[in-house]
Image (cartoon, rainbow, N blue to C red):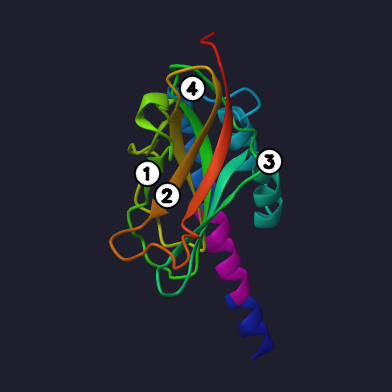
């Protein structure tokens, strides 16, 4: 009986590692086509991580490069927190950042993001965001316990720009108490 339990646990861990490796490979292919901020993880680094054999090691290595950490609770409510990635943009360039999604529902919904600058219209900094979607990294989640996606963010003008990001996975999934929103202050440099 103990052997069967260990076998089930090992096969579950193997499935998680295989799924995570597939995500990393897809993210690497997507990032090859996108611009990313200075210091953000490179496609080569993602492929190197895909060779690791421990999911926890992979998650720890990705942690400094994640701008948003989302949690989807069992009722499909979305909560978001600021990750550890540096919030730096180049004016007029759309840059890709990692989003980590901890999904306790096991469902595979479409991930969406919106931006509210929360400032008067004559002072808008033009911060925009979209979930990157292509054949390698779809916007729809996989249903895995942990998913990684890319969010592309652009600011039109240089300076310090703050934006309020709202994440959801469909109508009625916004978290109670506005925990599905997070403000990020970006340092936006001139185009390079």
Residue found at the very far top of the displayed protein: 192
Q: Nearer the viewer, residue 165 or 7?
A: 165
| Residue 23 sits inside the magenta stretch | no
User: Badges 1 and 3: C-beta atoms under 8 Å apart?
Assistant: no
The mark found on residue 114 in the picture is 1
User: Badges 1 and 2: C-beta atoms under 8 Å apart?
Assistant: yes
Q: In terms of secondary structure, where does tag 3 sit?
A: helix
| Residue with the mark numbered 2 | 166
Judge whether residue 26 can be spotted in this image: no
Residues at marks 3 and 4, CA–CA distance in whole angstroms = 18 Å
Residues at marks 2 and 4, CA–CA distance in whole angstroms = 23 Å
Occupied quadrant, residue 187: top right
User: Badges 2 and 4: C-beta atoms under 8 Å apart?
Assistant: no
Q: Earlier in the sequence, mark 2 or mark 4?
A: 4
Q: Which residues are magenta?
A: 9-19
Q: How many neighbours does mark 4 have within 10 angstroms: few (below 14), some (14-19), or many (20 or more)?
A: some
Residues at marks 1 and 4, CA–CA distance in whole angstroms = 20 Å
| Residue with the mark numbered 4 | 35
Q: How many neighbours does mark 2 have within 10 angstroms: few (below 14), some (14-19), or many (20 or more)?
A: many
User: Badges 3 and 4: C-beta atoms under 8 Å apart?
Assistant: no
Q: In terms of secondary structure, where does tag 1 sit?
A: strand
Q: Position of residue 180 (x, y in %)?
A: 46, 57
Q: Earlier in the sequence, mark 1 or mark 3?
A: 3
Q: Position of residue 74 (x, y in %)?
A: 45, 74
| Direction from residue 82 to residue 114 in the image, left or right | left
Q: Nearer the viewer, residue 30 or 183?
A: 183
The mark found on residue 64 in the picture is 3
């Amino acid at each position: 009986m103990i052997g069967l339990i260990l076998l089930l646990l090992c096969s579950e861990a193997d499935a998680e590692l295989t799924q995570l490796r597939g995500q990393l490979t897809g993210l690497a292919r997507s990032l090859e086509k996108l611009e990313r901020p200075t210091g953000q993880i490179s496609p080569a680094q993602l492929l190197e991580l895909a060779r690791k054999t421990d999911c926890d090691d992979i998650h720890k290595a990705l942690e400094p490069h994640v701008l948003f950490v989302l949690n989807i609770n069992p009722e499909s409510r979305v909560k978001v927190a600021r990750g550890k990635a540096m919030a730096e943009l180049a004016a007029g360039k759309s840059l890709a950042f990692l989003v980590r999604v901890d999904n306790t529902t096991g469902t595979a919904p479409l991930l969406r993001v919106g931006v509210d600058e929360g400032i008067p219209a004559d002072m808008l900094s033009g911060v925009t965001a979209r979930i990157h979607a292509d054949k390698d990294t779809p916007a729809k989640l996989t249903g895995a316990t942990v998913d990684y996606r890319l969010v592309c963010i652009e600011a039109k003008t240089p300076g310090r720009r703050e934006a309020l990001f709202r994440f959801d996975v469909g109508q009625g999934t916004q978290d109670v108490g506005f925990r599905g929103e997070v403000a990020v202050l970006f340092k936006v440099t001139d185009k390079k």
